Amino acid sequence: MFKTILVHVDGGPCQQSRLRAAALLAGAHDAHLVGSAATGVSFSSYAVLNGSMAMPVSNRDFQELRDAVTAQLDDFVAAAERLGMHGAEGRMVEDADRDGLLLQSRYADLVVVSQDNHHDRARAERGLPQYLALHGARPVLVVPDAYHGKPIPGDALVGWDGSMPAQRAIAAALPLLAQAGAVHLALVNPDLQSGLHGDEPGADMALYLARHGIKVEVAVAHTRATEGEALMDMARDCHAGLMVTGAFGHSRYREWILGGVTRDVLDHAPAPLLIAH
């Protein structure tokens, strides 16, 4: 069960959609909501800057950062109250967003963030969802800005490629999948990965899910489209309220790229997307 849900708070234009999703899940699981907001400057960095030859950060500037974050957290708590979530908690972190969320995620069951906002480059921290999935131990729910409160999970689409990250994502999503009207276990071109699927692709994972009381059907796509495009098309076709996929990280030049599930899924999934590494 999800009993503590951590929400990224930055006061940005996408915050309301992710809070709406987090509140819906908190209500369904009787969970505690925690909002995490960051000043962007750690106390140690503040001390170093003031002791260096660089232009120091004044006490007034530092306090203004803290005051701005306090206001964001107050707004978060008030917005959660309006959604019926009483007792929501705000936590200030004197660090970067990604590091503060990574720290706070140790004490949560699920982290809720937004898709990267390409229209708010000044405010948004790029690559936040994948950073948290790759470096943290908790599943990450990535919420589209267009999300307006559709039931989660509703019907769910689960990407299955036989990998360890996909297994971890499915295990993390079990509390949600158990509430789904139907679960579509999606395989894209499984014949290209026969060593990971066995004689009947998807059958063993479908049986695993069924033993958890989950209604599941296997959907196989043979396509020339990328795996990400195929999964998003399948999600639209079944009107999924939730997508679940594993996440891969590698590359020395880009801290992370997605194997199997493309960057497009992370940026453009039509429904909230649960990822785990």
Image: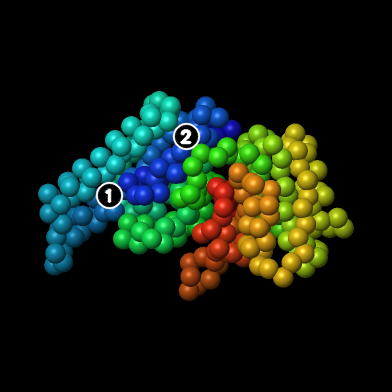
Classify mark 1: residues with Cα within 10 Å, few (<14), some (14-19) or many (20+): many
- Say which residue label 1 marks: 39
Residue sitting at x 26%, y 54%: 41
Residue sitting at x 44%, y 58%: 116
The amino acid at mark 2 is Ala
Residue sitting at x 15%, y 52%: 61
Colour pattern: rainbow
Q: Quadrant of the C terminus?
A: bottom right
**Whole-Å distance between the Cαs marked 1 and 2?**
24 Å
Q: Where is residue 196, by image quadrant?
A: bottom right
Disc 1, SS: loop
Disc 2, SS: helix
Horizontal side of residue 268 vs 216, given as left or right: left
- Residue 222, given in percent of the width and then of the height, sits at 77, 64
* Residue 153 numbered mark, or none: none
- Residue 83, given in percent of the width and then of the height, sits at 42, 30
Classify mark 2: residues with Cα within 10 Å, few (<14), some (14-19) or many (20+): many
Horizontal side of residue 30 vs 168, given as left or right: left
Horizontal side of residue 220 vs 26, given as left or right: right
Total marks placed: 2
From where the camera sits, is residue 51 visible? no
The amino acid at mark 1 is Thr
- Say which residue label 2 marks: 23
Q: Where is residue 179, by image quadrant?
A: top right
Q: Are marks 1 and 2 in contact (CB under 8 Å)?
A: no
Residue sitting at x 75%, y 38%: 215
Q: Quadrant of the N terminus?
A: top right
Q: Quick one: label 1 or label 2, which is nearer the N terminus?
A: 2
From where the camera sits, is residue 91 visible? yes
Which dot, 1 or 2, sits closer to the camera?
2
